[in-house]
Image: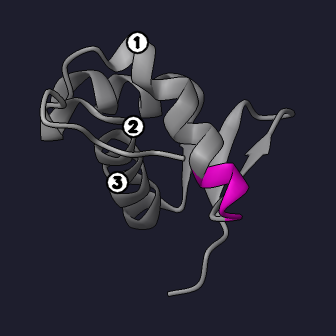
Amino acid sequence: MLLPNKHSHPDQTVLAAAVTILKELRRKRVVTYDDLKASLDVRVRSADYLFSPAVSLLYLLELVEYRPTVDSFEYVGSE
């Protein structure tokens, strides 16, 4: 369960990182792994630690798919 507490900074949580990734994917539809990580690095501090859990959350929610042949993430959610 993802529960924030009073010490959690709103911009440095898995949920905030997932929203940032989702915005990028909805805008471009297909984004390479490196470009997606770089876009998160620009907007969120501690992006190294948040990238993997955020992508995992979006995958569990069936909003993204990973395409290993092109090393890219694709947005598959509905509009």
Eye-nearest disc, 2 or 3: 2
In terms of image quadrants, where is residue 62? bottom right
Residue 71 included in the magenta stretch of the image: no
Q: Amino acid at mark 1?
A: Asp
- Assign a secondary structure to mark 3: helix
For marks 1 and 2, give the one nearer the viewer.
Answer: 2
Label at residue 48: 1
Residue type, mark 2 in image: Val
Residue 16 at what x, y percent from top left?
A: 28, 45
Q: CA distance from mark 1 to mark 3?
A: 16 Å
Q: Position of residue 23 (x, y in %)?
A: 34, 59
Name the colour scheme: one colour
Find residue 21 and name its label: none
In this view of the protein, which residue sits in the foreground, 1 or 14? Answer: 1
Which residues are drawn in magenta? 58-62
Question: Secondary structure under badge 1?
Answer: helix
Q: Is residue 47 left or right of residue 6?
A: right
